[in-house]
């Protein structure tokens, strides 16, 4: 029973605290509250504010980055639309130029065709004239020889022969046209 004995010989009730321990506990608690309020809580408040500011700054930066990304997206879409419009314009110009080139080539081909036809016609006319001249002289010679045999006299005289041949050919041409 020695450990239950209290100073002064009284027995202490375990439910009721000792008042000296209570005073020391209250002083220690007050001292702890003072140290916490004076040094620890302000530091915690500063750390909390710094974290809040960092989070809010990060959110602001994220919002700014999002706004910039949206602006760049809109700018990209606008440039893409402009590029499509420009491509359509270039395509239309190329088509128009192709049609123009085709028309130019067709016109040049037609001119070349007309030139070739005209040259051919001129050559045919020249050859025809040459052939007609040759035939006239041959027909004239044959006609003079034949006429000389029929008439019985020589038509060798140049002036007579020419006049007779020209008359004969003129009569032939008139008969051919009729």
Image (cartoon, grey):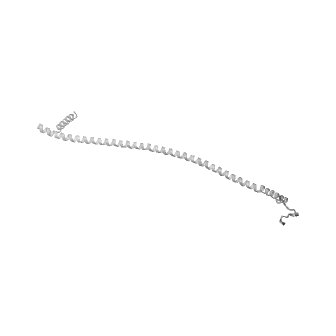
Residue 166 on image: x %, y %:
20, 36
Q: Quadrant of residue 8?
A: bottom right
In percent of width and height, residue 62 lies at 63, 50
Q: Quadrant of the N terminus?
A: bottom right
Q: Residue furthest front?
A: 1
Q: Nearer the viewer, residue 75 or 119?
A: 75
Query: Going 23% across and 42% down the picture, which residue do you hit?
Result: 131
Foreground: 66 or 148? Answer: 66
* Left or right: residue 177 compared with residue 101: left
Quadrant location of the C terminus? top left
Estimate the x, y position of residue 2 in percent, counting from the top left.
Answer: 84, 66
Which residue is drawn at the image coordinates 76% and 56% (left, top)? 40
Q: How many marks?
A: 0
Q: Residue furthest bottom?
A: 2
Closer to the camera in the image, 147 or 20: 20
Residue at the outermost left position? 152
Q: Is residue 156 visible?
A: no
Q: Is residue 47 found left or right of 110 in the rendered image?
A: right
Task: Please determine whether, in this image, residue 166 is positioned above or below residue 20.
Answer: above
Left or right of 169? Residue 4 is right
């Amino acid at each position: 029973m020695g450990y239950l004995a209290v100073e002064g010989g009284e027995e202490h009730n375990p439910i009721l605290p000792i008042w000296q321990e209570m005073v020391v506990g209250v002083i220690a608690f007050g001292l702890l509250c003072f140290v916490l309020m004076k040094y620890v809580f302000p530091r915690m408040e500063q750390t909390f504010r710094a974290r809040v500011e960092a989070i809010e700054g990060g959110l602001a930066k994220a919002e700014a980055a999002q706004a910039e990304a949206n602006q760049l997206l809109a700018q990209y879409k606008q440039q893409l639309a402009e590029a499509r419009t420009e491509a359509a314009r270039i395509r239309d110009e190329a088509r128009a130029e192709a049609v123009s080139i085709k028309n130019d080539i067709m016109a040049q081909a037609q001119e070349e065709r007309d030139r070739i036809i005209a040259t051919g016609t001129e050559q045919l006319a020249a050859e025809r004239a040459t052939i007609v001249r040759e035939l006239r002289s041959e027909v004239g010679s044959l006609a003079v020889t034949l006429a000389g045999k029929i008439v019985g006299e020589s038509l060798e005289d140049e002036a007579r022969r020419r006049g007779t041949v020209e008359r004969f050919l003129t009569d032939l041409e008139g008969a051919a046209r009729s």
